Image (tube, rainbow, N blue to C red):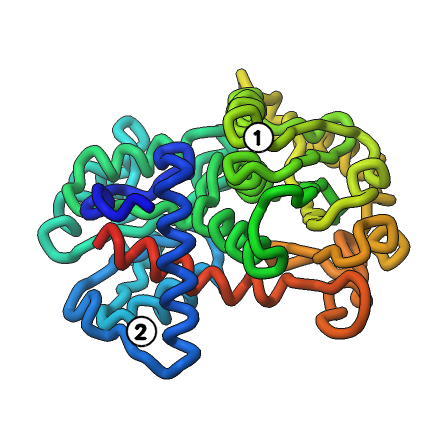
Amino acid sequence: MKTTGFKGRDFLAETDFTKEEIETVLSVAEDLKLERAKGIYHDDMLRSKTLFMIFYNQSLRTRNSFEAGMTQLGGHAHYLDPDKIYKPAMEGREVAYATERVSDVARVLDRMGDAIAIRCYGDPVDWEYGGAHEMLREFARWADIPVLNMEDDVYHPFQGLADVLTVKEKFGGFKGVNFTMSWAYSPSIHKPRAVPQSAILYATMMGMNVTLAHPQGMELAPDIMTQCEEYAQAAGGSFRLTNDFKDGVEGAHVVYPKAWCATPIFQPPIGEADVKKTQAIFDQNKDWICTSKIMDMAAKNAIYMHCLPCDRGFEVTNEVIDKTEGKGWLSAAFDEAENRLHVQKAVMSLVM
């Protein structure tokens, strides 16, 4: 287990860390979770430390898990609404008396606190794929304190950590686990790629047998796919793609169906900035919904996972997501949501 080299580091993408380092984060999360259950407090870990949180997008789980985590570790989280401050903007995108350059915001917050956490994707960067991640990297370039990615347009590294911690808890490890990340239908086409991309990156890094299932037109980023293939080979797992929902689910231990946007929604050269074409791809695939019949095709001890919020009646039926007890497959979506708290506490305790 690697226990050195974490302090002061940014947490922007899982690909910035080695498998051994991610395993350390998971071990720390398990320890903190167990001790919390025993009534052991950790309010001396980050005593009097401050986390600044900038949300360009809405949040329930992310905001509250970070705020609760900081409280439990003895620190405090400041919520910063970009519409209530001078909105941080990249060079060339400033608007007089409405924005403030990222480099300036980063250096000011650096002088006042101990870490900066940011969520940004989609509309705030006009669906320019990678634009939000570039902005987070710019924050990290100018701030000496850690910068944490609460989800951008490429990665959602904390959600991915919660995903693999949940798998580890349910199956005792990763070897031999069949993990299926699948697209699912939603009436909303404005869903970033970050969750599925981080999910398959972590799953292949940990050595699971990973299947990515989606209709044609819902492809993920080519560099992410290449990295997954490399991770799978290095860790002794596997990685495959299918355009058939049922084929993807059959025999899976983890079934993770979630909507994400189609490529045409992005600005050129990645996409075409074409909302109508994106909507058409969605409308052609309304049958991609996780039902009890679909879950019956998975392994008997399978778990259903979702990052939440889910679109009930579209991505998943009530009987699937609400089945948390009984025989056979079960929903682990709410265990997964709780684990956001524990993995984030682990990372903050290590880097802050």
Q: Quadrant of the C terminus?
A: bottom left
SS of the residue under disc 2: helix
Tell me: 29 left or right of 308.
Answer: left
Q: Can you say whether 248 is above or below 264 in the image?
A: below
Q: Which residue is mark 1?
A: 236
Q: Nearer the viewer, mark 2 or mark 1?
A: 1
Marks 2/1: CA distance? 37 Å
Image spot of residue 296 (x, y percent): 87, 55
SS of the residue under disc 1: loop
Q: From this viewpoint, which residue is outermost toward the right?
A: 293
Q: Can you say whether 222 is above or below 334 in the image?
A: above
Image spot of residue 239 (x, y percent): 65, 29
For the residue carrying disc 1, how many other residues have a C-alpha within 10 Å: few (<14), some (14-19), or many (20+)?
A: some
Q: From this viewpoint, which residue is outermost toward the bottom?
A: 39
Image spot of residue 155 (x, y percent): 47, 39
Query: Which residue is at a point 26% across and 33% down the rendered structure image?
Result: 138
Tell me: 137 left or right of 163.
Answer: left
Image spot of residue 136 (x, y percent): 32, 38
Is residue 188 visible from the viewing direction of this image?
no
Q: Are marks 2 and 1 in contact (CB under 8 Å)?
A: no
Q: Nearer the viewer, residue 324 or 309?
A: 324
Q: Which residue is mark 2?
A: 72
Q: Nearer the viewer, residue 305 or 99?
A: 305
Tell me: 179 left or right of 56.
Answer: right
Q: Quadrant of residue 137?
A: top left
Is residue 287 visible from the viewing direction of this image?
yes
